[in-house]
Image (spheres, rainbow, N blue to C red):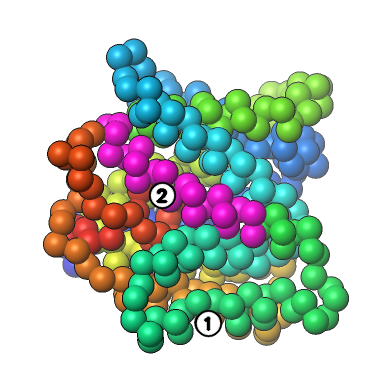
Amino acid sequence: MPVPRLRGSALAVVAMISVQTGAGTSSWLFDRFGVPGTAWLRLTWAAAVLWLIARPRIRGRDRRELGTALLLGAVSGLLTLLYFEAVVRIPLGTATALEFLGPLAVAVAGLRRRVDALWPLAATVGVLALTRPWSGAVDLAGVGFALGAAVGWAGYILLTKRVGDQFTGLGGLAVSMAAASVVTLPFADVARVAGQMDLSSFALSGLAALLLPILPYAAEMVALRDLPTAVFGTLMSLEPAVGVVVGSVVLSQQPSWPQVLGVVLVTFAGIGTVLSTPREATPRVRGPDAGGKRPSSAASGGRCEAEVGSSG
């Protein structure tokens, strides 16, 4: 395997493990700062670190470009908050699989063949196996938060594509994380966060922010430069399965056989959708403008820029 593809594949795996481990090891922070407070702390850490690294240029930028980055931040903040509210109520693998329906829906929307109806059908059956609404045992609030995160993830993908075209490096991500911190601030109990903060809490919250969102966002962005979209999307489609493994190892959440089947079906739907997405001849556009024309975006399962038709 060529070195760039090997590096990109490794980074994609690192991103998935980091996201799921970061979410799975948040219980102590949730107990200490509350779910909204934990989300706000992570995003604030991410904003500070990324701003120091990227030093984004704000003066002289088009207001529409800044507006898109700020909107991405708002979506990112709400996505983080909804996802954390889900994982404290339902198993990590289930929450991740339900959240994955967002990028899956974006990708399915671009398919045209009749046979491609198999993928949303498989995902639907998988969701039913995961939630088992007929049993009455499902936490409806947890499912609702996860589905809300799915909507946020779909919006994140579409907006990240635009921000990635308009900003270089990590500048757009830094602006977005700053906006995400501001958006989640009203939900956080700042007095509780300040009252519970000590040196160990400060260090742990920083480490948690490194696991999610700093490391995975940066890893995915680099991986997308090394891998064709189909390869990246196929790898990232495995994230629900990674969530089950991390939930089992870190949180001792042993999934039932129907839940395992549900995760397998959702993962199968994600891989099938990525491999069925038609390739376009247009190469990936990196500059802020390309004569007003850019390739169409689609979901590849990652939280960062995803684009159909890349030649890698």
Residue at screen point 50% across, 77% down: 120
Question: In what element is the residue under mark 2?
Answer: helix
Which amino acid type corresponds to the residue marked 2 in the rendered image?
Answer: Leu
Seen in the picture, residue 74 relative to 155 is either above or below; the reply is: above
Most common secondary structure along the magenta stretch: helix
The quarter holding residue 97 reads bottom right
Q: Position of residue 152 (x, y in %)?
A: 56, 50
Residue at screen point 36% across, 67% down: 110
Give the mark, 1 or 2, whose residue is nearer the N terminus: 1
Q: Which residue is mark 2?
A: 158
Give the side of residue 280 with respect to residue 91, left or right: left
Which amino acid type corresponds to the residue marked 1 in the rendered image?
Answer: Ala
Callout 1–callout 2 Cβ contact below 8 Å = no
Q: Position of residue 305 (x, y in %)?
A: 35, 48
Give the side of residue 176 with respect to residue 2, left or right: right
Q: Residues within 10 Å of mark 2 (few under 14, many from 20)?
A: many
Using the image as rendered, state which of residue 270 and residue 226 is in the foreground: 270
Q: Which residue is mark 1?
A: 122
In the rendered view of the protein, which quadrant contains the C terminus?
bottom left
Seen in the picture, residue 267 relative to 63 is either above or below; the reply is: below
How far is the residue under mark 1 from the one under mark 2? 24 Å
First to last magenta residue range: 147-168
